[in-house]
Amino acid sequence: MTSPPPDAPLSGAHRLIGYDVALDADGSARVSLKIEAKHLNRNDSLHGGIVAMLLDSAAGFAASFYFGGDLLQRVVTVSVTTNFIAAADAGQVVATGTVSGGGHKIAYAAAELRHADGRLLATASSVFKRVAQT
C-alpha cells in the first residue's frame, strides 16, 4: 500500500473530513477515518453522508488508479448505490474500493466500509467517468 503522491492535491472535502488514502499495487484503494464527534449524526453514529463519501472516495481512487496507473486520473461519479448495513459510533473505519471492469472512459467499481473490528458497515456499487486533465 502506498499513499497518493505527496504533491497530489487534496479536495476540500478530503481536508474537511480528514480521511487517509492508500493505494495498492493491485489497483485497490483504501480510505480510512478515525471517527470523531464531528463525524457523528444526531443519533451519535457515523453520519450516513460521511459513510457514502468514504465509499465514493475509495471507489473513485480505485477508478483513478485504473485509468492512470501510477498517475491518478481525474474521474467523476456517474452513479453510486449505497447499502447501509450497520452503524458505527467510535473507532476506525476503512473503505476499500476495487474496479471490476470498464473501458477507456467508464469504470465500474465497488466499495465496502468495515469497522476496524471487521464488521461490515456498508457497501456501494459505482460508475465513474474519466475526465480530461486540466
Image (cartoon, grey):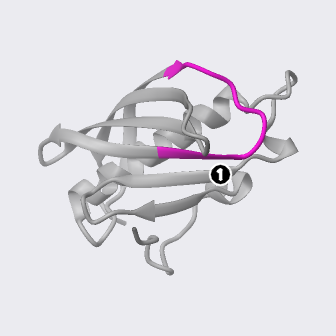
Q: Position of residue 91 (x, y in %)?
A: 73, 46
The quadrant in which residue 78 appears is top left
Up the image or down, 134 lies above or below 113; here it is below
Give the residue furthest to the front: 117
Q: Secondary structure at mark 1?
A: strand
Q: Is residue 133 left or right of residue 54?
A: left
Describe residue 2's horizontal placement relative to residue 73 as left or right. Answer: right
Residue pointed to by mark 1: 33
Quarter of the image that includes the N terminus: bottom left
The foreground one among 56 and 106 is: 56
Residue 43, quarter of picture: top right
Within the image, what quadrant is residue 118 found in? top right
Q: Which residue sits at x=81%, y=47%? A: 36
Question: What amino acid type should be assigned to the residue bearing mark 1?
Answer: Leu
- For this view, does 8 lie left or right of residue 93? left
Up the image or down, 123 lies above or below 10; here it is above
Q: How many marks?
A: 1
Assess whether residue 87 is covered by the magenta stretch: yes
Q: Residue at x 78, y 40 (%)?
A: 90
Q: Characterize the local packing of mark 1: few (<14), some (14-19) or many (20 or more) Cα atoms within 10 angstroms.
A: some
Q: Position of residue 132 (x, y in %)?
A: 29, 57
Magenta region: 83-95
In the image shown, does 93 or 23 lie closer to the viewer?
A: 93
Q: Position of residue 19 (x, y in %)?
A: 63, 56
